[in-house]
Image (cartoon, grey):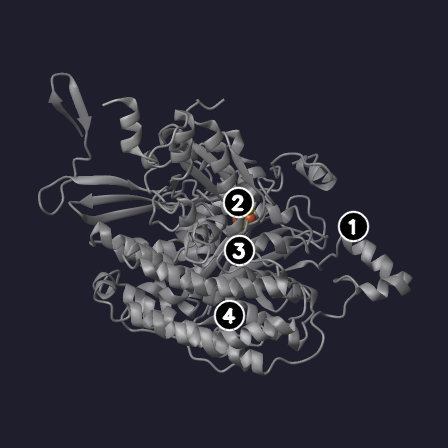
Amino acid sequence: MTTEIGQGITVDRTGETGAFGGELLTVNFGPHHPSTHGVLRLVVDLDGEQVKRIKPVIGYLHTGIEKQMEALRWQQGVVVTDRHDYLSPPINNLAYALAVERLMGVEVPPRAQALRVIMCELTRLSSHLVWMGTSGLELGAMSMLMYCFRDRDTIMDMNEEISGFRMHTSYIRPGGVFADATPRFLDMLDRFTAKTMTKNVDEYEALLTDNPIWRRRTIGIGRLSAEDAKVLGATGPMLRGSGVAWDLRKAMPYSGYENYDFEIATSDLCDCYGRYLVRIKEMRESVKILRQALDRLPDGPINVDDRKMLPPPREELETSMEAVIHHFKLFTEGYSVPPGDVYVAVESGRGENGCYISSDGTHKPRRVKFRSASFVNLQALERMALNHFIADMIAIIGTADTVLGDCDR
Amino acid sequence: MGIEALAESLGQNFLTTTLGKLVGWGRGNSVWPAQFGLACCAIEMIATATAGVDIGRFGSEAFRASPRQSDLMIVSGRVSQKMAPILRTIYDQMPEPKWVISMGACASTGGVFNNYALLQGVDKIVPVDVYIPGCPPRPEDLLNALMILQERIKAQGILPRQ
Amino acid sequence: MIPEALVVDRGVSAGDSWLTVDPAKVHDALSALKDEGYSLLVFLTCVDHLLDSSRNWPARYELLYELRNLETREQVRVRAFVDGDPPHIDSVHDLFPPANWDERETYDMFGVVFENHPDLTRILMPDDWVGHPLRRDYPVGGEVVEFSEEHETWQTAPEKA
Ligand code: SF4
């Protein structure tokens, strides 16, 4: 609708009126906005300060990961999987590794499985810590950022000890894991699970759970009923925060999760506060799993004994011609995976992160597709934020915990 | 009052320098970065601002949400083709003098992603002062880059950038 | 139960059961499966089988719908093969709301046109992008780097694409 506001001067207006007689205002939010958790852009229609419509615009972090994987050999692809959901690299590695292993028909030895579980749970912790720190910062609890990153740094140090790298460890690979746990790592983990983390989660609860500001800004905000969450395909804390006890670690166990004793964290509150409680509980459960994994860490090899898939150990290279040939073949053309396709889903900090692989029998994948939790969960944003104030939208985006790298791939 | 008396009254309380050095000192020790996180590197950038590493020791803890208030853009992460025009707009919105740190392999060269979707190096669209290698660089690397940048800023003084 | 008339083929691949349906009836087949209890569409995607000699493919594009039954925890993968440029298939966003963005992504990446989709626009690439990046005849792109001979040859499109 074009209105003339002065002689010869016109402005375009939407012409829609809101409940209070005012005009609907379309506001652009992002992609460079401090509280969108990355480069999310939202086009929001506002009636006064109330949100009437949200259109998320994504793709600002589209990295071409799926195409890149088609150009890389099977064992090279691991490096790229790290970087798509950058708050939970080992979990992405695991999805990819399990998919390749299922196609190849191999199963990794028990010690490797336990080490995988350890890394995944550490990552879940660090992912929730980053979430809590940044969400706390956005909702006015700045000290949370400092505390949470303190613990995250401990986890990063452990990552570094076991894999040599802080964030993108590429630790879990098809056929096993990169290296065995060092005694120092086990020591650090012992201290971390026995003392540091149990005490610190209590500290976070003391800082936030009864904090009146935090409660005011999250309770009753961003409601998503269990039915809606299911229909919209939400997974992870978004679904569990609505009272549905669905956790892939329990529902469709992988990598030996069925042997651990833990509970599914749920909350019936269905709002931002509920999602927060779920994450806190999950952190406690992760510590429990870590403790059990550490106490029962089996001995044995950490890789499958398959020379066609993994390089032979260093000592063997000096004595065996065959080993040298295998080594050469692996590093010049890689291994090939039998034709077929497979889908493996794992539970990341955000929900179901899956990996679909289609192989045509060559030494590179034909198609790799990542099913990312953020991509699906983000579609529930409009349902949650409707008729809320724009300031509450920050809390809702925050507790949805989207990682844009995961969403855009 | 004679000149001696003036000198007397001021005592030891003044110092002579060139204007350039003074401005350089001031600018160099209060570099305000734009809060501009793109991908994984941004998490390490946040880690740099927290208590463990504490970028505040170097005067750069004030991450500004508005490009209008910042002097430094830390391009922390991969820049996609879709993001590139926005990044350039933000750079243009920053007031002079301004500097750019390209943090991480992706921002510097495209990193492990040599493909259609990413800009192969942010220096294609904005001038970069310091590159940090690493994927992601450690928080200490970012501090080091900041210190290198501070040296440059101090040396530059009030002269316009070449 | 899904009527047998809709199923063209079925089998198991690496432990996952799948069934192929006629692309023209994909909406009917999925709605039958939904009534059967497969209430969650885990993901929807496409595979481009251009110049793939490992198996006999009925058509170039394979559309995949991974469905899950939340009660019995069973999964099934529905395949539909389509050809043409651009290929056409019915949208299923009315059955499974999450399909909305998945279909937009598949359109963006493969150029598959979903009939009756409310807003079939690009989602990941810029709106003015030319081409569909995940098609096999679309080059990986990027820049030529030393010591990556393989990458360079891969960048050239196959002879007849
Ligand atoms: S350099 Fe590495 S850590 Fe940084 S954005 Fe790129 S992939 Fe992520």
Which of labels 2 and 1 is toward the front? 2
Q: Give the camera-side residue of B66 and A278.
A: B66
Residues marked 1 and 4, same chain:
yes
* Mark 3 lies on residue: A370
Quarter of the image for residue C146 reads top right
Residue sticking out furthest to the top: A8
**Beta carbon of the mark 1 residue lies under 8 A of ligand 1:** no
Tell me the SS state at disc 3: strand
* Mark 1 lies on residue: A332
* Mark 2 lies on residue: B144
Q: Kindly check if marks 3 and 2 are in contact, taking CB atoms under 8 A apart as contact.
A: no
User: Alpha-carbon distance for marks 4 and 3?
Assistant: 20 Å
Residues marked 2 and 1, same chain:
no
Chain letter for mark 4, please: A
Which of labels 3 and 2 is toward the front? 2
Q: Amino acid at mark 3?
A: Phe
Chain letter for mark 3, please: A
Q: Residue at x 46, y 80 (%)?
A: A262
* Mark 4 lies on residue: A121
Which of labels 2 and 4 is toward the front? 2
Q: Residue at x 60, y 36 (%)?
A: C142
**Beta carbon of the mark 2 residue lies under 8 A of ligand 1:** no
